[in-house]
Amino acid sequence: MFKKFASEALGLSDIGKIIPPKDYDKVESDDYILHEDNEKIFFLIKSKQDEYCFTNRALIHVDGTSAISKKRTLKRYEYYKYPISSVLLETAGTIDLDVEIKFKLGARNSASSVSKSSSSSSGGTSFSIDVDKNQLEQLKDLYKALYTISLIESSNYSSYNGAYDTLNKAIQVVSSNRSNEANQAEELEKVTNYIGQFLDDAKQKYVKKDYSDVFLKYLNN
């Protein structure tokens, strides 16, 4: 117990270790993976307090209040609902024991400060995860994957908004060129069906939910 208190006081409990794939079934996060829906763990960082599990679909954060408490809170962030941004990798100084990977979830249009622990704000949720500096090379691969996902999400977000703006302009043109009242109901039905199909197609094209291809490209599992 004294060692746990000492570790907490010195901040050493926050330094995470990258867990190898062969041990994924031994961590708590694995219990919450949607295996039935083909969800797969691609990267996992575990400290005495927390687990950060990166799957093809989401970040699963098993959030601990402290190294000496067994209480945990499960938080799940689907990438398509909580877009990744501001991905940073901070290497170690001469006397540092750790390196850090930092990123934000759900913070496309506003900045929020990055703190040692994740914190919610109007700009989204910020993470700063400490990792053993001897595992820097492995952490670089995670950085590449998260950065690439952030670029894809940013591009898709812009494209989806562009498609939506185009749709609104088309609706305005149709509204200003309506024919006689007898045909309005029929025209309204056609426009409604078209809008529904248009939005379904746009979501199918620009809302990406599975990033297996990105993780497979950068991570050696």
Image: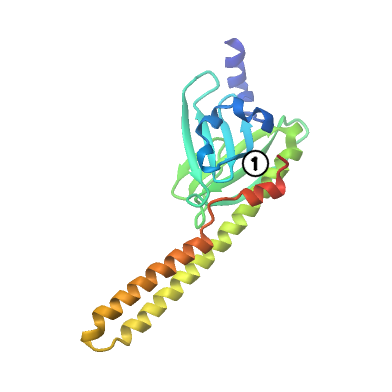
List the residue tagged with mark 1: 101
Q: Position of residue 177 (x, y in %)?
A: 32, 87
Of residue 164 and residue 22, the one placed in the foreground of this image is 22
Q: Residue furthest front?
A: 36
The answer to whether residue 36 is left or right of residue 23 is left
Q: Nearer the viewer, residue 56 or 52?
A: 56
Relative image position of residue 120 (x, y in whole percent): 46, 42
Across and down, in percent, residue 114 comes to 56, 43
Residue, x 50% and y 33% (percent of image)? 32
Report the front residue among 87 and 144: 144
* For residue 216, above or below residue 51: below
Q: Is residue 173 left or right of residue 135?
A: left
- Asked where in the image residue 29 lies, by quadrant, the reply is top right
Count of all numbered marks drawn on residues in the image = 1
Question: Quarter holding the C terminus?
Answer: top right
Outermost residue toward the top in this view = 2
User: What quarter of the picture does the N terminus occupy?
Assistant: top right
Disc 1 residue crowd, few under 14, some 14–19, many 20+, Cα 10 Å = some
Q: Amino acid at mark 1?
A: Ile
Q: Is residue 140 visible?
A: yes
Q: Residue at x 50, y 52 (%)?
A: 80
Q: Residue at x 30, y 80 (%)?
A: 187
Q: Secondary structure at mark 1?
A: strand
- Residue at the image point whose x is 74% and y is 34% from the top: 135
